[in-house]
Amino acid sequence: MAQRGIREYDAKKMLARCWGDYFPGLPAYQGRGVLVTADTPLAELARQEKWLAKEKLVVKPDQLFGKRGKHGLVLAGATLAEAAEWIESRMGREVKVGAASDRLTHFLVEPFRPHQEEYYVAIKSEREGDAVYFSTQGGVDIEAVWDGVAECHVPIMGNIDQIDIEQMLGGVPSPRREIVAAFIRGLYRFYAALDYAYLEINPFALTGHGGVVPLDTVARLDDTAFFESGRSWGDIDFPAPFGRTWTAEERFVKELDEKTGASLKLTVLNPAGRIWTMVAGGGASVIYTDTIVDLGGQSELANYGEYSGDPNAELTYQYARTILDLMTRQPDPQGRPKVLIIGGGIANFTDVAKTFSGIIRALTEFKEPLKKVNARIYVRRGGPNYQRGLEMMRQLGATLGVPVEVHGPETHMTRVVALGLGAEARGEARA
């Protein structure tokens, strides 16, 4: 499962669109809001959304970072003119949040709803099921009051109606307790049915007529569920995390990933790097990367990513050629060989020979560029059909024109990294 953050705008639109299905006893939530960019200014949107000129507004950036109020990035109770001026003065401005910095490019504008009581609710996917959190101290830095947050667990294949939600609501005044309980149950059904991996509303408020208004939302979807829930998600965007933008290659792999039940991930760390990896499995990718760093190769590490979930040969080919294209664009300035580690643990169900056929096709296509960067290739793999896959790699090594060193599961994963980095000769390989 890959958790992918979505904009608050999209999460609220999804909630409003599905409200009747999951919150049948609560008054409708309209989810009115607009997403403002430099290409679509607020004045233009106001001609379509008449409420913008009639109501007081709340404005905030919508770019996958939190604590916007603490950074002076929330405007509340504004007129349309004030909101437009506030956005214009900040559009394109670079801001720093924690260790990350980025330019402001997307702003959410929605109706201002004065309120008094604020509540916190969050649902998080865990190995054994889902955790549901609730607090009467919404609207604050929830980590600072975490000792007062109530928690319950819904096991895998469990039913939220069988969970005693009311035991978490001791601090809620009795006239509102039934409303809050209905909202939490409905929110969990919405979360589970649409394949969310994380959903936090901090805060949500109650209206005078017994309704619920989500005021601030953080949401992540399980993007491997696109085939199942994509229609319910609607025309949704998965923006880059705050502080970075997608390269063309990362975006291409992301698009491949969204079209399959397998997993294909790529992050380019250093396009001029000398050490490249093509690793099968999320856990293995962590081990290989950690070993490269442990052996002193962090400054030369070019990428991070993984392919897993039994992708077919065509997908693996597309993934491999993307990495090889990046790897062979420029030789090392010091003339040292480029290193490609094609690794993985011992697969449970991924057909090693099938995925290797796609990788071999890409390696063959990039035969001459690999020679020009003096490439060295190190292979280590195990799992279904691995003997045939390794033999295919050995046969490729006889014709490719660059060294290809092939190892099976008898060779430790970290030793292959040491061989690639030359650390084996220095006695630095880990057992």
Image: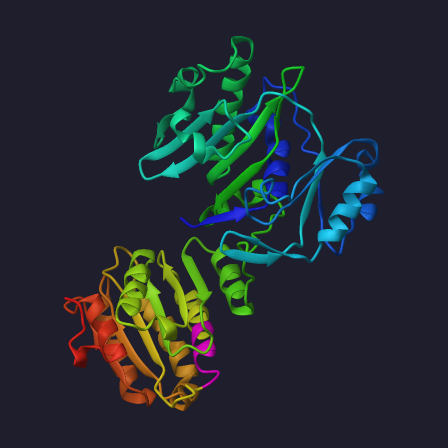
Res 331 → quadrant: bottom left
Return the residue found at the far top. 175
> Compared to 180, does 10 lie above or below?
below
> Compared to 173, does 216 lie above or below?
below
> Compared to 334, does 123 lie above or below?
above
Residue depicted at 49% across the width and 34% down the height: 191
Give the x, y percent position of residue 185. Answer: 48, 23
Residue depicted at 37% across the width and 75% down the height: 300
Give the x, y percent position of residue 32. Answer: 71, 34
Left or right of 277 on screen, residue 182: right
Residue 219 is one of the magenta-drawn residues = no
Residue 325 is one of the magenta-drawn residues = yes
Res 393 → quadrant: bottom left
Left or right of 287 on screen, residue 157: right
Residue 259 seen in the current view: no
Image quarter where the C terminus lies is bottom left
Give the x, y percent position of residue 209. Answer: 67, 15
Scheme of colours in the image? rainbow
Q: How many marks?
A: 0
Residue depicted at 63% across the width and 47% down the height: 235
> Compared to 414, does 141 lie above or below?
above
Instruction: Tell me where the magenta segment starts and ends, as one range.
Output: 322-330
> Residue 250 or 121: which is nearer the viewer?
121
Majority SS type along the magenta span: helix
> Residue 161 or 67: which is nearer the viewer?
67
Residue depicted at 64% across the width and 44% down the height: 73
> Residue 262 or 38: which is nearer the viewer?
38
Give the x, y percent position of residue 372. Answer: 41, 90
Left or right of 56 on screen, residue 16: left
Left or right of 323 on screen, residue 422: left
